[in-house]
Image (tube, rainbow, N blue to C red):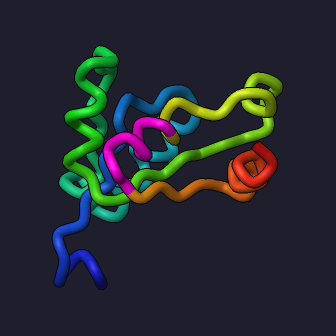
């Protein structure tokens, strides 16, 4: 597996709640990924930039909630500012292409 040859870490800036938290905790435990999936917990906005700057790739989970249809997520601009490669869902890609 890739992780045996390369030190890869999924860093969740913020936290996960509800059913998603239960699923993630179960998945991490089942696959023994405790050191590879890390959650920072809530951060003050001033702390977010330095934490993102330590990462190489940024992911943006973008769904079609009403406020997401008319506004781009702040993560996108944080990644651009920090020259971080950002990846997103097709919905966000369509949004960016049309703005």
Outermost front residue: 99
Q: Is residue 83 above or below residue 62?
A: below
Q: Nearer the viewer, residue 48 or 33?
A: 48
Picture quadrant where residue 57 is located: bottom left
Q: Residue at x 70, y 55 (%)?
A: 93
Q: Using residue 59 as the reference point, say whether residue 28 is left or right of it.
A: left
Residue 80 located within the stretch drawn in magenta: yes
Start-end of magenta stretch? 77-84
| Residue 36, quarter of picture | bottom left
Relative horizontal placement of residue 99, taking residue 86 as reference (left or right): right
Q: Of 35 and 48, which appears nearest the observer?
A: 48
Expressed as whole percent of the image width and height from the top left, the position of residue 53 reads 24, 44
Expressed as whole percent of the image width and height from the top left, the position of residue 39 reads 30, 37
Q: Total marks drawn?
A: 0
Point out the image quarter for the C terminus: top right
Q: Residue at x 24, y 75 (%)?
A: 3
Report the front residue among 55 and 10.
Answer: 55
Is residue 8 a member of the stretch shown in magenta? no
Magenta-highlighted stretch: main secondary structure?
helix
In the drawing, does residue 73 fall left or right of residue 11?
Answer: right
Placement of 78 over or under 97, stated as above or below = above
Identify the residue at horizontal 76%, vertical 50% (top origin). Answer: 91
- Image quarter where the N terminus lies is bottom left
Residue 15: x, y in percent?
39, 30
Identify which residue, 25 or 74, lies in the foreground.
74
Residue 90: x and y in percent read 73, 58
């Amino acid at each position: 597996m890739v992780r045996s040859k390369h030190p890869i870490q999924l860093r969740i800036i913020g936290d996960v709640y509800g059913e998603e938290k239960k699923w993630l905790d179960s998945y991490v435990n089942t696959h023994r990924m405790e050191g590879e999936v890390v959650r920072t917990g809530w951060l003050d906005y001033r702390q977010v930039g330095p934490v993102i700057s330590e990462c190489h790739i940024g992911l943006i989970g973008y769904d079609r909630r009403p406020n997401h249809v008319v506004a781009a997520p702040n993560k996108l601009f944080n990644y651009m500012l920090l020259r971080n490669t950002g990846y997103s869902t097709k919905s966000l890609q369509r949004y960016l292409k049309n703005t």
